[in-house]
Image (cartoon, helix red, strand yellow):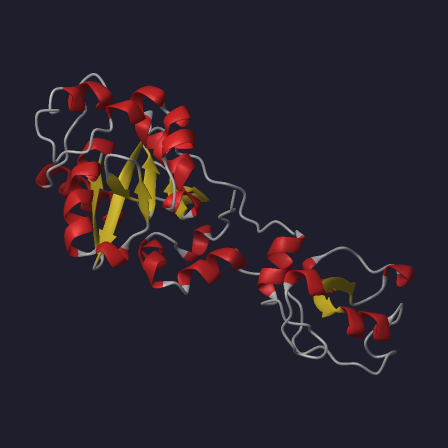
Amino acid sequence: MHRKSQASRSKRTGKRKKAGNGIGAHLKNNQQDEHIPSTGSLAAAGARELSNGFSDGLSAKVLVLNRHYLASRVISAKHAFILLAREVAEVIHADDGSFANYDLMTWAELSELQKEFEPDRHDWVRTVRFHIAVPRIIRLTGYDKLPQQRVKLNRRNLFARDHNQCQYCGHRFTTSELSIDHVIPRTQNGPDTWENLVCSCVRCNSRKGGRTPAQANMKLIRKPAVPKRNPLISIKLNNKKYASWKTFLDEAYWSVELR
């Protein structure tokens, strides 16, 4: 309730602008001001414009909220700009515990100031004619569902949970140098579960073989468990650029998936 009321206040007091009959149409009426980014082609061409003209920051990640301001998933910046151009999402800019809502045109205008006064705080998408800051958070204005409250068990999430660290020798390795070990081997009916799978280097995996750690006289450095939050999201939160995500990532909704 607090977040919703806070958002409502920001909408009433902020300089949020509606795009009339579309962002492209609104910008067309303002083309006489060369300082306003000409993003009409973005709204008109959508995915095609993003694919052909944008670069740099498109690989950055954007947190997606549903319309109730609850974390839903994480997507690429390219996908986020497409949603904004289609006017099915808005930018949520969080700073110092408060946040404001912007449509794409207003965010593009704000990016002009951000580029001048705080360029290092943002990732940037560049076209021939202008720069626009990659929003850290967007909100889907007509979507109220949440994903299932679980973290997918896959190789990427497992390596992230164990921080690319062999759970027997404790050394860190690149992904290509790691394997997945069944604590209780498959030959002994060991299941494919979070509690029975760990990262292991090739050497330790070969040494352990088809035995349990006790049988191989080896010890795990930590007991494997189901992560309470998506481990890849936790890694992002260590980057100051994604600190604003914490405002919306309540413990009850740590099922966010990277796509």
The residue positioned 58% from the left and 67% from the top of the image is: 163
Residue at the image point whose x is 65% and y is 76% from the top: 222
| Numbered marks: total | 0
- Residue 243 left/right relative to 194: left
x and y percentages locating residue 127 in the rendered image: 30, 36
Q: Is residue 107 visible?
A: yes
Percent position of residue 123, x then y: 32, 50
Residue nearest the viewer, comparing 176 with 136: 176
Q: Nearer the viewer, residue 180 or 142?
A: 180
Decide if residue 21 is on the left or right side of residue 173: left
Position of residue 60 in the picture relative to residue 39 (left or right)? right
Relative placement, left or right, of 55 versus 204 is left
Above or below, 82 against 159 in this view is above
Q: Which residue is most to the bottom?
A: 217
Q: Position of residue 126 (x, y in %)?
A: 31, 41
Vertical placement of 255 versus 206: above or below? above
Percent coordinates x, y for residue 131 in the rendering: 25, 41
Q: Residue at x 15, y 55 (%)?
A: 117
Q: Residue furthest front?
A: 128
Q: Splitting the image into 4 quarters, where does residue 110 fall?
A: top left
Question: Visible in this render: residue 1?
Answer: no
Tell which of 66 and 207 is nearer to you: 207
Question: Can you tell which quarter of the image residue 217 is in?
Answer: bottom right
User: Splitting the image into 4 quarters, where does residue 97 fall?
Assistant: bottom left
**Residue at image point 72% right, 57% down:** 193
